[in-house]
Image (spheres, rainbow, N blue to C red):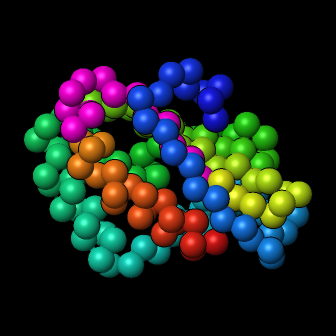
Amino acid sequence: MKTTLTRADYEDAFARFIPELSEEDTAEKLLQRMSTEFPSFVLRAKKFKEMLFSPLGFSPVGLEQFRWMDLGRDDRVGIFTNKPFTAHIGLSIDRKRKKVVLSSRVVFHNFIGRGYMALIKPAHRTVFKFLLNRL
C-alpha cells in the first residue's frame, strides 16, 4: 500500500490467519464481507463520533465513503480525503500463508487531524480488529 501514499504521519496493520481462505475470495469480496450488517452498538458509536467531529470539518468516515482501487485480485486500497486528513485503507491477501492484512496510512493536513487521530487511535485499532474477525 505504500505505493498509493508516499508519505504517512500514521500507519498500522493488522493480520488474521484464515485457514478456510478459498481461491474465490478476493480482496473486494472480503471487504464486502467485513462491511455488512454492523451491530447496533457500532452504528450508534459511529453516529456519536460524527456528531462530535463534524463541527470541526470532518466528513463521516465509513468504508462506503472511500474511493476504492483494485491493485490486483488480492490487493485493494481505499482513499478518503477530508479537511483534517487523507486516509488510505488497504486489504491484502497472502494466499501462501492464508493470511489477510488490513492496514491504514494517514497524512494529517492540520493539527485537528493529529488531535483526532490521538483521540480515536484506541477505537481505530478495535474497529480494525473487529473487521478482521468478521472474516
Q: Quadrant of residue 6?
A: top right
The N terminus sits in image quarter:
top right
Question: Residue 11 placed where, x, y %?
Answer: 49, 39
Residue visible at 72% across and 44% down?
Answer: 75
Residue 55 drawn above or below residue 37: above
The C terminus sits in image quarter:
bottom right
Left or right: where 6 falls relative to 42: right
In the rendered structure, which segment of residues is drawn in magenta?
102-115
Q: Nearer the viewer, residue 24 or 131?
A: 131
Residue 112 drawn above or below residue 65: above
Q: Is residue 128 magenta?
A: no
Residue 28 visible in rendering:
no
Residue visible at 41% across and 29% down?
Answer: 9
Question: Residue 124 placed where, x, y %?
Answer: 38, 55
Left or right: where 68 falls relative to 74: left
Residue visible at 70% across and 49% down?
Answer: 92
